[in-house]
Image: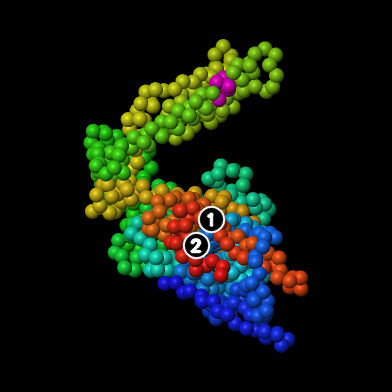
Amino acid sequence: MYLLNVASLTAKVVHGRRYWQIITSQRINGKPRQIVLAHLGTADTLLARLQQKPGEPIKARIQQFGLLAAAWSLAQRLQLVSLIDRHVPKRRQGASVGQYLVLAALNRLTSPRSKTQMAHWYQQTALRRWLPLSRKQLRSQRFWDAMEAVDERAIGKIEADLSRQLVEGFGIDVRCLCFDCTNFDTFIDSRTTSELAQRGHAKSKRADLRVVGLALLVSTDFNIPLFSRIYPGNQPDSVTFGSVTEELIERYRVLAKNLEHVTLVFDKGNNSEENLEGLVPSRYHVVGSLVPAQHRDLLDVSLDRFQTFEDSRLEGVTAFRTSKKVFGRDWTIIVTHSQELLDGQLRGITQVLRKRRRALAELQWKLKRSQEPGAKGKGYTLKSLKAHAQNLSSGQYIQKILRVEIRRQRGKLQLNYHTDGHALEKLTATSLGRRILFTDNHEWTTEEIILAYRSQHHVEAAFRTMKNPYFVGWEPMYHWTDQKIRVHALYCVMALTLAGLLHREARRAGLDLSLEAVCEELSSICEVINLYAPISEKAGRLRAATTYTEPTPTSNRLAEIFRMNDLKAR
């Protein structure tokens, strides 16, 4: 249901003179307030304005409109400002914490900026009408004050209420949920105290930077986040999963109020007997994967025993179904073989082998040069040469394929290497192209189990979206205290929520577009304010007339879907 703000004409007497204004009424912090949309001046001034030809504009101002209008419309449907303000202390004056955090989320969604640049960005948007704030209120210190009011407990309550609103108000499908973890680089100095920013296994491969981790639970219904947790960047995924088990159980009670069956999908990095045992009280069902190397008996099953599928989504996939006791419980086991996965793995192995053989050839040449008469430098010892060779022949599959031999002959070290074709054939026949899935959904068909596990791409897509520098960007993050980092994560996740809803609403209306395409089309709708000369020399204020950029058929349809006419300037 939408609430339309109706504009009205009213008069105001100043020093005995009557001035006319166009006003509307909005609720701010739960209280009705009059908002001035336009100052029209006296009756004579208004008459002159109506009779005068507009002439040529002196200049124009272009403001962001489309993407912000659509996101603001969704934020209003979620009642996001009041939802946040319910769980944080009220501010004595000025904007509420909810207004600041929603503004930050909208900024992340449309044009990620630092807090010092927020006021400049805000002045170039139509938000000035919907969320009126002064330059003083947009100082970075005011944002930090608002963020300071949001503690970890409040974040949990805000997320729980938002999840409930998404399920009850938008009907988000929660029958299958995906959990995974990622991390983000920071540029926090090593001497800065922080428990969250740690050096760990950075996804970006930047070993020189401290990272913070983010765990997400998202729906398969357009990657909508329903739970998040920020954690130290050096913490393993399985430890993170175990640390949030109780919170996931609590979130289950929120999400599955009218459901008897919710399946949690996660990858093998979260596996442990303790973690799976911890989920039992929640009644979550699970679909996960096992480490293939730890189950040789399943890998040795001949492909002749694998079944094929008619479902077009499983083209090129075969599977073998059985049961096995793992992590202290009996599970349905599905061993899959995918030609697409096999081809991808073989391409990756070939590329790595090419690089490693090139490096070994260079090492071989350096060894030969170092042992020639008159050679300079320290040279290689047997121990150092073995260390170099072991490093170049290491890797999940490479160590089984690339054979390196070091020996001493006639007082000199020799290095030889070759690719073991037989070992590669054996890997191709038994391990490559295979995944081992486990589940307690024993009544599900094999196709349903495989497709459920494949839905994990939804959480991976959510992480890719958050690492997009143009829409829903996590960076830049100019915060270095743990409390501020947690609040930064909160409004970034809210931005991801709004992005998922934008994509969902567009698809439900029949537009088959990617999220990036939806954002680009909406961003193309801009507000153009033409500024004209004042009516008279005495009236020094420029006259303004607002229009909008010419829409494409797609952006015009999106404008209809998100009812942007209700938010246009009058």
Give the residue at x 70% y 85%: 17
**Main secondary structure found in the magenta portion:** helix
Q: Residues within 10 Å of mark 2 (few under 14, many from 20)?
A: many
Where does residue 133 sit, x and y in percent of width and height?
A: 63, 70
Residue range corresponding to the magenta coloring: 359-364
- Which residue corresponds to mark 1? 550
What residue appears at the point 43 percent right and 51 percent down from the top-left corner?
A: 513
**Three-letter code, disc 1:** Glu
**Which of these two is toward me, 153 or 88?**
88
73 up-or-down from 195: above or below: below
Q: Is residue 570 magenta?
A: no
Can the viewer see residue 326?
Answer: no
Residue 451's label in the rendered image is none
Rendered location of residue 205, percent (x, y): 56, 42
Residue 299, image x, y percentages? 31, 36
Determine whether, in the image, residue 475 is placed left or right of residue 521: right
- Where residue 132 sits, quadrant-wise, is bottom right
Q: Which amino acid does label 2 sit on?
A: Ala
Which residue sits at x=43%, y=48%? 269
Which circle marks residue 70 in the picture? 2
